[in-house]
């Protein structure tokens, strides 16, 4: 008798457990899970968007550095002066290309698109954090604002003129400040520079306004 009753209780309990498992989650439990996911997303999504923007900025700086190196090699190889120039793409975005003695962009020229959220400032006056301190610590004179970097046949930086020449100014180099604004409004800066010996460097600005060479 008791054995049969105990068996009945066990069968009854097993059926209740199966029914409880079959019901799944309650509405309150689902709301708690959704709220938890939204809280996590509120913290992680902005950081993710800023990180993606920072990566794109570093790519832009690296590509600009490579474009400058291409211009330098072309100048030495062809025994003339080459530089880089900005151009506007059909979609309205800015890009830089390697040019020969003031020539306009021709499809097939080495080109670096920058996108709509990236802006390049040629020389000082960019508004970058601690720009004056950074430029003053480089140890060389910076070409006037608006002057694009060029290289002569020896691979040294020079400044193109209207008479189709590119004289070298001893002890002078170039600085490009690159700014990118993330979708959430965060502003990041890097700098691509050419020192008087023709070496190309990339610097980045951290959150405190300090510049570090990469």
Image (cartoon, grey):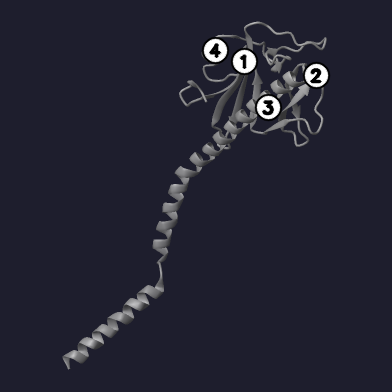
- Indicate which label's residue lies in the foreground, 3 or 1: 3
Quarter where residue 139 is shown: top right
Q: Which badge, 3 or 1, comes first in the chain's sequence?
A: 3
Label 2–label 1 contact, CB within 8 A: no
**Inter-mark Cα distance, 3 to 2:** 16 Å
Q: Which residue is mark 2?
A: 102
Please tell me which residue is depicted at 47% across the width and 44% down the height of the picture. 44
**Inter-mark Cα distance, 1 to 4:** 16 Å
Left or right of 186 in this view: 157? right
Q: Which residue is mark 1?
A: 125
Tell me if residue 152 comes above or below residue 120 in the rendering.
Answer: above
* Residue 72 x/y as whole percent: 69, 20
- The residue nearer to you, when weighing 48 against 195, is 195
* Residue 36 x/y as whole percent: 41, 52
Left or right of 20 in this view: 38? right
* Residue 54 x/y as whole percent: 55, 34
Using the image, tell me which numbered label, if any, was put on residue 138.
Answer: 4
Q: Residues within 10 Å of mark 3 (few under 14, many from 20)?
A: many
Q: Which badge, 3 or 4, comes first in the chain's sequence?
A: 3
Residue pushed farthest left? 2
Secondary structure at badge 4 equals loop
- Indicate which label's residue lies in the foreground, 1 or 4: 4
Residue pushed farthest bottom? 1
Q: Which badge, 1 or 4, comes first in the chain's sequence?
A: 1
Please tell me which residue is depicted at 43% across the width and 59% down the height of the picture. 31
**Inter-mark Cα distance, 3 to 4:** 22 Å
Q: Residues within 10 Å of mark 4 (few under 14, many from 20)?
A: few
Q: Which residue is mark 3?
A: 67
């Amino acid at each position: 008798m008791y054995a049969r009753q105990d068996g009945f209780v066990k069968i009854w309990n097993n059926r209740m457990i199966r029914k409880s498992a079959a019901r799944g989650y309650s509405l309150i439990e689902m709301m708690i899970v959704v709220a938890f996911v939204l809280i996590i997303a509120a913290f992680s999504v902005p950081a993710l968007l800023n990180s993606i923007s920072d990566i794109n900025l570093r790519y832009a700086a690296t590509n600009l550095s490579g474009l400058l190196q291409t211009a330098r090699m072309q100048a030495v190889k062809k025994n003339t002066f080459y530089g880089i120039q900005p151009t506007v793409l059909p979609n309205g975005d800015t890009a830089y290309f390697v040019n020969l003695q003031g020539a306009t962009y021709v499809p097939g020229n080495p080109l670096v698109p920058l996108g709509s959220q990236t802006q390049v400032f040629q020389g000082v006056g960019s508004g970058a954090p601690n720009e004056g301190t950074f430029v003053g610590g480089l140890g060389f004179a910076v070409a006037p604002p608006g002057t694009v970097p060029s290289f002569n046949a020896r691979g040294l930086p020079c400044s193109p003129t209207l008479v189709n020449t590119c004289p070298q100014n001893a002890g002078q180099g170039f600085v490009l400040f690159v700014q990118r604004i993330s979708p959430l409004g965060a502003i990041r800066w890097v700098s691509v520079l050419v020192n008087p010996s023709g070496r190309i460097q990339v610097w980045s600005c951290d959150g405190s306004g300090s510049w570090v060479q990469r």
